[in-house]
Image: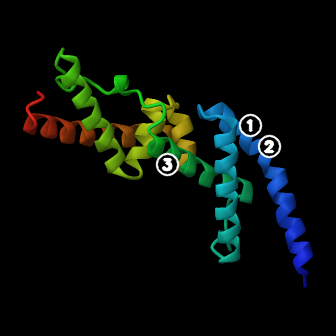
Amino acid sequence: MRTDAESVDKITGMFEAYRNPFIAFFSKQFPLEKAEIEDIYQESFIVLYQDIRKGKLDGLSASLKTYLFRVGINKTLNYIRDTKKYVDLSEISDMGESEETEVREKQKEIVRRLVLEMGDPCSKVLGMALWLKKSMEEIARAMNYKTSQVAKNKKHACLKSLKERAVKEMKSEGLI
């Protein structure tokens, strides 16, 4: 049986072993400051540790590192959504925008709010595709979809739903 000191040493070793690869990967994949990524790493590692302690990872088919990175991706996307960082709605298709700047800004705010309200998986898929400029292959891997076509289909369905909701709301507010 392990002593508490041995458990602490093992957890500390895991923390150190995964830290630099995590920071390197997330620095390349997301437009965040190193300090932000370090904070996300710590939060992600805490989730990993808690899930191990609760027995949630018994029979896990992926590696602990893969699980940690998946938690990190979710935390990163939530962080970007919550801080409204790096939002560029120029990729959203034309929904009848007026030439007037004030109307266009109101329309963008409606779209931004609706994307955030959509929840998973749409908010994550759209966030990666539109704002983070991820390829369908990258999205498929991050979301654990079998193929990039599945990611593409999900993006299409989410955009269709977003457009319908946005047009309805913009019409009701007299913006289109």
Element carrying mark 1? helix
**Residue at point 28% right, 43% down?**
114
Tell me the mark number nearer the camera, choosing from 1 and 3. Answer: 3
Type of amino acid under label 1: Ala
Q: Residues within 10 Å of mark 1 (few under 14, many from 20)?
A: few
Type of amino acid under label 3: Asn
Question: Does the residue at mark 1 contact the one at mark 2 (Cβ under 8 Å)?
Answer: yes
- Residue 71 left/right relative to 167: right
Type of amino acid under label 2: Asn
Q: CA distance from mark 1 to mark 2?
A: 6 Å
The residue that label 3 is drawn on is 78
- Residue 135 is marked as none
The tag earlier along the polypeptide, 2 or 3, is 2
Identify whether 123 is placed above or below 136.
Answer: below
Q: CA distance from mark 2 to mark 3?
A: 22 Å
- Residue 174 left/right relative to 69: left
Q: Residues within 10 Å of mark 3 (few under 14, many from 20)?
A: some
**Residue at point 59% right, 34% down?**
30
| Quarter containing the N terminus | bottom right
**Residue 76 visible in image:** yes
Identify whether 122 is placed above or below 149.
Answer: below
**Residue 144 visible in image:** no
The residue that label 1 is drawn on is 24
